[in-house]
Amino acid sequence: MNIVMCVGDSGEMLFNGRRVSRDEVACGDILKQLKGERLYIKPYSQKLFAPFEGNANLPTVCEDPLGTASDGEWCFIEDEDIMPYFDKIEKLLIYNWNLNYPYDMRLDLDYVRGKLRLSEMKKLVGKAHDKITRELYRKDYRSKI
């Protein structure tokens, strides 16, 4: 299973039950990076991808992406702890807003960086964020996305 997440600089995901931030450029880049591979999202995330309706690569909406995705398929996660699934993760694509936010839920980036290898990093300029860092982590860092 492969996972895509958007987080703050310290792994922040949610504050008061809402995503800490969003950016249309990041969502478009997600679709571009996955090159038509299946991406599962929850109904909560559906509005993030609404600007791309008509795109043949739109995500598949389901209630339980982490329970639905098969090996090699992608999940966009913004409101769930991925740690119970960590051993199944082959690739983790993180969009870092490079800002610190208050949070109720966060991804433990130190743990991720200790267990997976950073194989690719790119700086993006977003619509709502001047600086977004895209980081791709892999179990097998030699394979391609």
Image (spheres, rainbow, N blue to C red):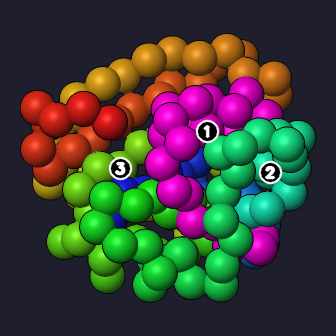
Q: Which residues are magenta?
A: 22-44
Q: Residues within 10 Å of mark 3 (few under 14, many from 20)?
A: many
Q: Which residue is mark 1?
A: 31
SS for callout 3: strand
* Residue 19 screen position, x and y as percent: 73, 59
Q: Position of residue 44 (x, y in %)?
A: 78, 71
In this rendering, is residue 123 above or below 135? above
Q: Residue type at mark 1? A: Leu
Query: Of the residues shown, which amino acid type is indicated by label 2?
Result: Leu
Residue 141 is labelled as none
The residue closer to the viewer here, 35 or 21, is 35
* Total numbered badges shown on the rendered structure: 3
Residue 121 image point, x, y percent: 36, 22
Does the image show residue 57?
A: yes
Please identify the residue farthest to the front as the structure is shown.
Answer: 56
Labelled disc at residue 92: 3
Mark positioned earlier in the residue sequence (2 or 1):
1
Q: Is residue 35 magenta?
A: yes
| Element at label 1 | helix
Q: Counting residues from the N terminus, which is met first, the one under dot 3 or under dot 2?
A: 2
Q: Nearer the viewer, mark 1 or mark 3?
A: 1
Q: Residue at x 44, y 84 (%)?
A: 67
- Residue shown at 81% from the left, 28% from the top: 128
Q: Callout 2 environment at 10 Å: few (<14), some (14 to 19), or many (20+)?
A: some
**Which residue type does callout 3 highlight?**
Leu
**Which one is closest to the eye, mark 2 or mark 1?**
1
- The mark nearer the N terminus, 1 or 3, is 1
Residue identified by numbered label 2: 48
| Front residue of this view, candidates 12 and 37 | 37
**In the displayed structure image, the side of residue 43 where residue 66 appears, left or right:** left
Quarter of the picture containing the N terminus is: bottom left
